[in-house]
Image (spheres, rainbow, N blue to C red):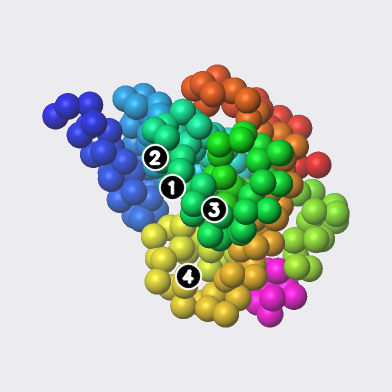
C-alpha cells in the first residue's frame, strides 16, 4: 500500500476501534495516521472526538483546534476557485455585511468559522466540560442547555453516544433540542477562537499548538 492507503486504513481502523469502545487503541491508530500525514484534517478531527470519549478533554480541544487551523491553510493558501466557493457559501449563509465583519477579525480569505460549524460545537463541549464547578462558564452552560428543554446531563449522555458511533440514536434523542444546544457550544467556541487562535501563522499546526497550549485551562 502507498502512504495514502496506509493512512486511510489506519483512520478506518481508528473509527472501528472507537465504535468497539477501545478508545486507547483508536487514539493510537489516529496518531499513527498522522505520523504518515500530519495534514490529514479528518484524523485530527476524529482524534478530538475519541479523546473526548476517553475524558482527555484538553487534548481533545488541541486536536479540534489543529483541525480548524488546517482549514485556514486549505482556505487561505488553496486555489482561488476554492476561496471563491467558500466565500460564496458564507455569503449565502450569513450575508455579505456580517461576513465582512468576520474578515476584519480573522484572516481576510477565511470564512471558515461559518463553514466549519460542526467542529466548533464539538470544540465548545471539550472546552466547557473542563470549567470548574460553580464557575461562571460552568453555570452558564448548564443554564442555557436546560433552557432548551433537555436536561444538561441527559444531553451530554446522548452526545457521548453519538460520538461513540450511535449517531441515529443521538439524533432521535435530541430531536427538537439539538440546534439550540449546539448553538450554546458554538458561541463558547467562537468567543475562545477570537481570543486565542493564531490566525496569521500558516504552517504546520503541530508547531503552532503544542501539547502545553491549554495548560491554563478554561477561564
Quarter residue 219 falls in? top right
Mark 3 or mark 2, which is nearer the start of the sequence?
A: 2
10 Å crowding of disc 4: few (<14), some (14-19), many (20+): many
Q: Which residues are magenta?
A: 145-154
Residue 188 horizontal/vertical position (percent): 71, 52
Q: Which mark is residue 132?
A: none
- The reply to whether dot 2 and dot 3 touch (C-beta < 8 Å) is no
Q: Which residue is mark 3?
A: 90
- The reply to whether dot 2 and dot 1 touch (C-beta < 8 Å) is yes
Q: CA distance from mark 2 to mark 1?
A: 6 Å
The answer to whether residue 165 of the structure is visible from this angle is yes
At a point 46% along the width and 63% down the height, the residue shown is: 162
10 Å crowding of disc 1: few (<14), some (14-19), many (20+): few
Q: CA distance from mark 2 to mark 3?
A: 14 Å
Q: Which residue is mark 1?
A: 85
- Under circle 1, the secondary element is helix
Was residue 148 drawn as part of the magenta stretch in this picture? yes
Was residue 95 drawn as part of the magenta stretch in this picture? no
10 Å crowding of disc 2: few (<14), some (14-19), many (20+): few
Residue 2 horizontal/vertical position (percent): 17, 27
Q: Which residue is mark 4?
A: 170
Quarter residue 180 falls in? bottom right
Residue furthest to the left: 1
Q: CA distance from mark 1 to mark 3?
A: 9 Å
At a point 65% along the width and 63% down the height, the residue shown is: 183
Mark 3 or mark 1, which is nearer the start of the sequence?
A: 1
Amino acid at each position: 500500500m502507498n502512504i495514502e492507503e496506509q493512512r486511510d486504513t489506519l483512520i478506518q481502523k481508528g473509527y472501528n476501534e472507537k465504535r468497539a469502545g477501545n478508545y486507547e487503541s483508536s487514539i493510537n491508530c489516529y496518531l499513527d495516521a498522522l505520523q504518515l500525514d500530519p495534514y490529514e484534517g479528518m484524523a485530527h478531527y476524529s482524534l478530538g472526538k475519541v479523546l473526548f470519549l476517553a475524558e482527555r478533554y484538553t487534548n481533545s480541544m488541541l486536536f479540534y483546534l489543529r483541525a480548524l487551523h488546517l482549514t485556514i491553510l486549505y482556505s487561505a493558501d488553496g486555489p482561488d476557485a476554492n476561496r471563491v466557493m467558500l466565500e460564496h457559501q458564507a455569503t449565502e449563509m450569513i450575508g455579505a455585511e456580517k461576513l465582512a465583519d468576520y474578515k476584519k477579525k480573522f484572516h481576510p480569505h477565511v470564512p471558515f468559522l461559518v463553514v466549519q460549524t460542526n467542529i466548533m460545537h464539538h470544540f465548545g463541549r471539550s472546552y466547557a466540560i473542563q470549567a470548574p464547578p460553580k464557575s461562571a462558564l460552568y453555570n452558564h452552560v448548564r443554564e442555557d442547555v436546560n433552557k432548551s428543554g433537555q436536561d444538561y446531563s441527559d444531553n451530554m449522555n446522548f452526545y457521548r453516544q453519538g460520538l461513540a458511533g450511535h449517531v441515529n440514536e443521538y439524533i432521535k434523542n435530541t430531536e427538537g433540542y439539538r440546534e439550540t444546544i449546539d448553538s450554546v457550544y458554538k458561541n463558547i467556541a467562537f468567543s475562545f477562537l477570537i481570543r486565542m487562535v493564531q490566525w496569521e501563522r500558516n504552517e504546520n499546526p503541530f508547531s503552532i499548538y503544542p501539547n502545553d497550549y491549554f495548560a491554563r485551562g478554561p477561564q
